[in-house]
Image: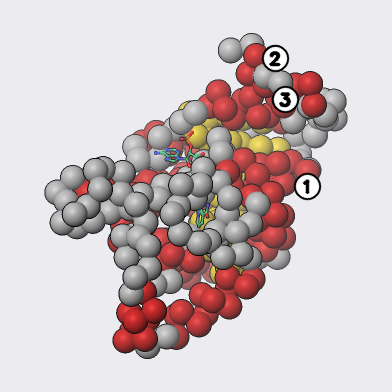
Amino acid sequence: MSGAAAAGTQSLRAPPSLAPLPPTAPLVFITGASSGIGQALAGRYRRAGFRLALAARRTDEVSAWARSQGIPADDVGVYAADVTRPEDIMAAGARCIATQGLPDVVVANAGISVGMDTAFAEDIAVMARTFATNNTGMAATFQPFVAPMARRGSGTLVGIGSVAGIRGLPGHGAYCASKAAVIAYCESLRGELRPAGVRVVTLCPGYIDTPLTRENRYGMPFLMQPEDFADQAYRAIDRGVRFRVIPWPMGVVAGVLRLLPRALFDRLLVGRARKHRQGPPAG
Ligand SMILES: NC(=O)c1ccc[n+]([C@@H]2O[C@H](COP(=O)([O-])OP(=O)(O)OC[C@H]3O[C@@H](n4cnc5c(N)ncnc54)[C@H](OP(=O)(O)O)[C@@H]3O)[C@@H](O)[C@H]2O)c1
């Protein structure tokens, strides 16, 4: 695809080419950079003067976006990887180190959110795919960077969790379980790497307006634009927070939900719309 064709009409509004960054500029590696939160984070990090290493399956989307932003080709590496294939994303990380250097920040953001109903045999595969993407995919994303960062004595690994990982929601068993696992996994990793000078940051978005939430059939309080999320996420990562819910009002909700007695929590959920399945409707 040509640059102009890829950027489409965006090229008419695209800013002029940005000045190239020096090769010594800091580097961020982001998965899920073809859409939503990952793309917004890439834009935020670029504005902060970072070189970009961007991974996704849809690399055409990533390259077209980078061109539409006027980012010089030398400032961005694009890596094709399916995070459900650990060897894919680990090889992408190794290529990033070999060609662009060891990142300062790695954001394991790629994720999927699909409703499930355990009564349907086919939804067991939904759960497996969700864990392969959101959990094994996250560990495989971090893997190539852990030992080199520990040797260097610096670096930040960022895991994108979710408020959905705080309590289990009906119809959302696969996603909630996967995001609860993200929170626990990142906490384990934090304890392991802190003595080596490597920080682990867990970010839990509330509701962000991306393709992942656009078909939700229930109210999404405090819905936020991805650019606003990225701005707050960038600042939280830069400050090295251990755990942060964004936006903060959702953090208050998450704090209350965490403390709510189970009987009360169950009563609150009665009649709440479920996350929709991808298959035929239940019932
Ligand atoms: N939006 C929200 O309200 C919200 C709330 C809480 C948490 N989150 C979390 O935020 C993260 C980003 O979500 P989003 O809202 O930005 O969703 P999105 O717009 O649907 O983007 C998801 C990204 O993940 C990538 N991805 C999915 N499966 C992949 C795979 N097998 N291999 C490689 N990349 C894969 C996609 O890239 P390709 O398809 O090009 O591979 C895409 O770039 C996810 O972890 C999600 O759970 C989102």
Dot 3 alpha-carbon crowd within 10 angstroms: few under 14, some 14 to 19, many 20 or more = some
- Give the labeled residue for mark 3: 10
Residue type, numbered disc 3 = Gln
The answer to whether any part of residue 198 appears in the image is no
- Of 145 and 186, nearer the camera is 186
| Disc 2 Cβ-to-ligand 1 distance below 8 Å | no
Q: Residue at x 57, y 27 (%)?
A: 61
- Give the labeled residue for mark 2: 4
Q: Earlier in the sequence, mark 2 or mark 1?
A: 2
- Of 111 and 154, nearer the camera is 111
User: Percent x, y for residue 231?
Assistant: 71, 55
Q: Earlier in the sequence, mark 3 or mark 1?
A: 3
Instruction: Label 3: state its secondary structure.
Output: helix
Dot 1 alpha-carbon crowd within 10 angstroms: few under 14, some 14 to 19, many 20 or more = few
Q: Are marks 3 and 1 in contact (CB under 8 Å)?
A: no
Q: Are marks 2 and 1 in contact (CB under 8 Å)?
A: no
Q: Earlier in the sequence, mark 2 or mark 3?
A: 2
Mark pair 2, 3: CA separation? 9 Å
The answer to whether any part of residue 90 appears in the image is yes
Residue type, numbered disc 1 = Ala
Residue type, numbered disc 2 = Ala
Q: Which mark is residue 281?
A: none
Q: Residue at x 59, y 30 (%)?
A: 62
Mark pair 2, 1: CA separation? 26 Å
- Give the labeled residue for mark 1: 48
Horizontally, is 220 left or right of 277 in the view? right
Horizontally, is 82 left or right of 210 in the view? left
- Of 187 and 11, nearer the camera is 11
Q: Is residue 171 above or below residue 26?
A: below
Residue 29 quadrant:
top right
| Disc 1 Cβ-to-ligand 1 distance below 8 Å | no
